[in-house]
Amino acid sequence: MPADTYTPNKNFILPGHGNYQNNWDSPVNADFAAIDTAFGGTSTVAIISTYQGLTLAQCQPPNIVLTGTLTGAVTLYIPGGVGGIWTVWNNTNGAYGVALGCGAAYLGRYITLPSFQRSLIVCDGINVDLANASKGTFTGSLTGMTGATNGPITYRVANGLCTLSATGSIASTSATNAMQLTGLPTTCQPATGFPTALSMQVWNGGVSTMAACQYSGGGTFSFYLVYAPSINAALHYDGGIGFQAAGQKGLNTGWNITYPLD
């Protein structure tokens, strides 16, 4: 007899032809129980690693709750090819971000989950987006850096957060001056000052935090990259001299900057 198969998104059993003779209730009841869970169940996921995948069983309910105390920035992913709509409550503790994408190496777009908030997200099996995100592009420029972005910078606004995305290779050229992103669109301009809970993400699945990031008004956003695979340097803002860091900071893939519109 042919082997059973399973649906790709919710993992419902599809019995092989002729299987379960006089025992048909077993797969039928299992499927109806799974369907009920898919309509109203909740998965509680303990974050125990900085790089962690969700299982198919954890993706079956429409509600996901993340728990645990974070010891570093977390890369979380839905199995590649699995689509759906979920609410995700980031109930973790710790001053680190949680990125959520699809596939172990992030097949497409991904998001940052704000702490102690519930986000409505959608995944098409490749990309993960906030379900109520508005999108746009702008052609702002980067200064104080080497390298360039490929094409326009994109942005998404949802749940009081703005996410800027671009691909290419960028690096800071100075240890004492901030890098600047100019031409920031009005919809992504935070309150003047230092946005809180700001993070940078690398599209290859790595995640890093950012420090001493300042919006000075007029569409100009200053920041310093913390992500540096070969350099471990502390950053601080002394209020007088400016942004301080030792050595050059850089990354070679894509980047996201996510911050609250406070």
Image: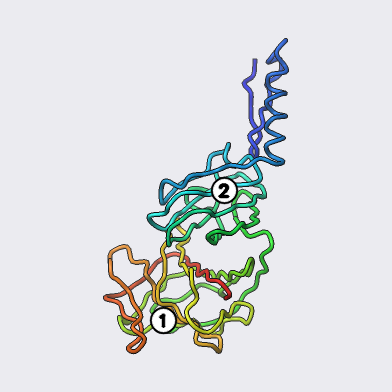
Task: Name the side, left or right, on which 259 lies relative to 226.
Answer: right
Image location of residue 260, percent across then percent down:
55, 71
- Of 208 and 71, which appears nearest the observer? 71
Relative to 230, residue 188 above or below: below
Residue 109 lies, with reference to residue 225, above or below; the image says above
- Going by the numbered disc 2, the residue's amino acid type is Val
Q: Earlier in the sequence, mark 1 or mark 2?
A: 2
Please report the residue visible at 36 percent of the width from the left and 86 percent of the height from the top.
239
Residue 52 point in image, percent of width and height: 45, 47
Of 89 and 143, nearer the camera is 89
The location of residue 252, given as percent across then percent down, is 40, 66
- Mark 1 and mark 2: Cα distance apart in space: 36 Å
Residue position marked by numbered label 1 in the rendering: 179
Residue 165 placement, left or right of 226 = right
| Scheme of colours in the image | rainbow
Q: Are marks 1 and 2 in contact (CB under 8 Å)?
A: no
- Identify residue type, mark 1: Met
In the rendered view, does 254 fall on the left or right side of 108?
Answer: left
Q: Quadrant of residue 81?
A: top right
Work out which quarter of the rendered image holds the N terminus and state it.
Answer: top right
Q: Residue at x 49, y 54 (%)?
A: 92
Foreground tag (1 vs 2): 2
Q: Residue at x 27, y 76 (%)?
A: 246
The residue to which callout 2 is attached is 65
At label 1, counting other C-alpha atoms closer than 10 Å, the crowd grade (few under 14, some 14-19, many 20 or more) is: many
Can you tell which quarter of the image residue 127 is in?
bottom right
Q: Is residue 3 above or below residue 36?
A: above
Looking at the rendering, in which quadrant would you find the C terminus? bottom right
